[in-house]
Image (tube, rainbow, N blue to C red):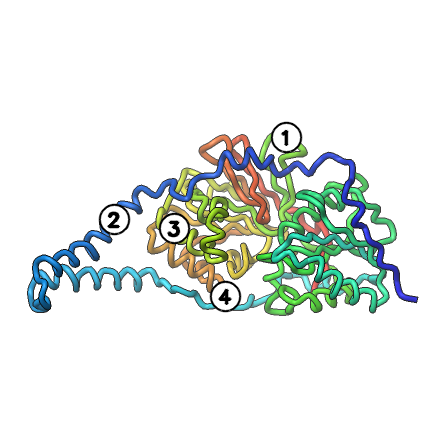
């Protein structure tokens, strides 16, 4: 007799308070900057560049020497050769690659502790939570055509739920009856995983199930850490097989407090806590460019943010020691990747009992471009900027409130401070051999 596939789609109207650690969207929108904010200096530079490299040489050619220019003249050298050489020098010195090469695979898997990885679960009953609007909005099709048939063929009972609104994954994981189940499987992206893990960590009965992720989101940056040992970061069938084999080691989580409220302003991070002085760098204010640039908006707007080169007196304290007091970018990571192809903390391990901080101090635009390319090409930026490990980090900001990122979710901090503490062995996670 085939195992029962229990649909939980009608469970979408749970009568509990809404998931509240992400502030109201309207409050967040009020803090979103324009992409032009802080760009006055770079606009002057671009105008000067256009004037020197394009307008003056063009005017000289059209009005002064309408016939073929004298290539031996001093004017020709000043108006053509010198600007061209300057542009070439900038490109070479910045190591600009129009299309950066793909990031290299992680040298090691995301685990350090090999003993714990021998612990296996007998997977017979699972709860599955899927986000139908993740990625290309094909999650429901993936669940029906690939995920459920594979579990059914393996004799696994599945109770599944489709999320109906933002924060619904949190509500489901916080309230569903876990009795008799062996695992909690998430079909979606980093945001869905973040919701579900936080919901489980908020349970009053403190019941924890091993968590598995079947990638269906846009970035799936958590799963990118496995790319050197498994295809589970991009292949649904492989991800299902990983859950079925039952290998579920313990992993750490980072506990984040970002305001005075003891419940609503704290969360667990399974990927990263990110802050950038310019919101273009963290993709907070670029959604309006989606129709024009598509996925390319992330790289283009990041380059725009780099060119603006904004910085602020943000202090970073790690285990009571001051690391920096004037930064442009910082990320407190649990994983190696900050996004698809962005390997910000190459030495991060999911079970090492420490968090990793990558931060960029005030520096030149050329160095920022080199660092950006280093992150895009497997983590070579560590030669240019610090990546530090510790157990607890405190970030202090010059403003009482502002925006930051938890696992891809835009949140608002209050009180001018964010604290992040590593919680070892917080949950179990289905992982490849």
Disc 3 marks which residue? 304
Disc 2 marks which residue? 47
**Mark 4 touches mark 2? (CB < 8 Å):** no
Dot 2 crowding, Cα within 10 Å, few <14, some 14–19, many 20+ = few
**Observer able to see residue 412:** yes
Q: Position of residue 398 (x, y in %)?
A: 44, 33
Q: Secondary structure at mark 4?
A: loop
Q: Nearer the viewer, residue 210 or 27?
A: 27
Spatial CA distance of label 4 from label 2 is: 34 Å
Spatial CA distance of label 2 from label 1 is: 47 Å
Spatial CA distance of label 1 from label 3 is: 35 Å
**Mark 1 touches mark 4? (CB < 8 Å):** no
Tell us which disc is closer to us: 4 or 2: 2
Spatial CA distance of label 1 from label 4 is: 40 Å
Disc 1 marks which residue? 261
Residue pictured at 10% horizontal, 63% vertical:
66
């Amino acid at each position: 007799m085939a195992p029962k596939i229990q649909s939980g789609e009608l469970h979408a109207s749970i009568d509990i308070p809404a998931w509240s650690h992400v502030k109201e969207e309207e409050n967040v929108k009020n803090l979103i900057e324009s992409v032009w904010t802080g760009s006055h200096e770079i606009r002057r530079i671009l105008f000067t560049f256009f004037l020197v490299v394009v307008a003056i040489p063009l005017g000289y050619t059209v009005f002064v020497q309408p016939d073929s220019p004298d290539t031996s003249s001093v004017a020709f050298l000043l108006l053509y050769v010198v600007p061209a050489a300057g542009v070439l020098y900038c490109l070479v010195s910045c190591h600009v690659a129009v299309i950066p090469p793909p990031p290299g695979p992680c040298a090691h898997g995301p685990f350090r502790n090999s003993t714990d990885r021998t612990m296996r679960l007998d997977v017979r009953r699972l709860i599955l939570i899927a986000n139908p609007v993740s990625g290309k909005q094909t999650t429901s099709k993936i669940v029906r055509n690939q995920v459920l048939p594979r579990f059914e063929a393996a004799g696994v009972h599945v109770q599944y739920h489709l999320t109906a609104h933002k924060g619904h994954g949190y509500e489901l994981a916080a309230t569903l009856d876990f009795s008799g189940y062996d695992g909690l499987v998430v079909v979606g992206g980093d945001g869905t995983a973040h919701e579900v893990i936080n919901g489980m960590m908020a349970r009053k009965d403190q019941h924890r199930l091993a968590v598995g992720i079947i990638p269906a989101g846009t970035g799936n940056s958590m799963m990118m850490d496995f790319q050197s040992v498994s295809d589970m970061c991009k292949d649904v069938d492989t991800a299902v097989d990983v859950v079925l084999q039952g290998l579920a080691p313990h992993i750490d989580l980072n506990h984040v407090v970002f305001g005075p409220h003891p419940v609503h302003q704290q969360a667990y991070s399974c990927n990263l806590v990110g802050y950038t002085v310019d919101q273009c760098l963290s993709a907070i204010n670029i959604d309006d460019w989606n129709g024009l640039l598509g996925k390319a908006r992330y790289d283009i707007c990041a380059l725009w943010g780099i060119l603006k080169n904004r910085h602020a007196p943000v202090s970073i304290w790690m285990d009571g020691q001051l690391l920096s007091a004037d930064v442009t970018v910082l990320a407190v990571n649990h994983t190696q990747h900050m996004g698809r192809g962005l390997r910000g903390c190459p030495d991060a391990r999911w079970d090492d009992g420490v968090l990793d901080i990558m931060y960029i101090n005030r520096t030149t635009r050329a160095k920022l471009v080199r660092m950006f390319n280093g992150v895009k090409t497997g983590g070579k930026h560590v030669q240019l900027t610090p990546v530090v490990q510790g157990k607890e980090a405190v970030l202090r900001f010059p403003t009482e409130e502002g925006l930051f990122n938890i696992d891809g979710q835009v949140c608002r901090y209050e009180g001018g401070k964010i604290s992040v503490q590593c919680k070892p062995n917080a949950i179990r996670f289905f992982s490849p051999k």
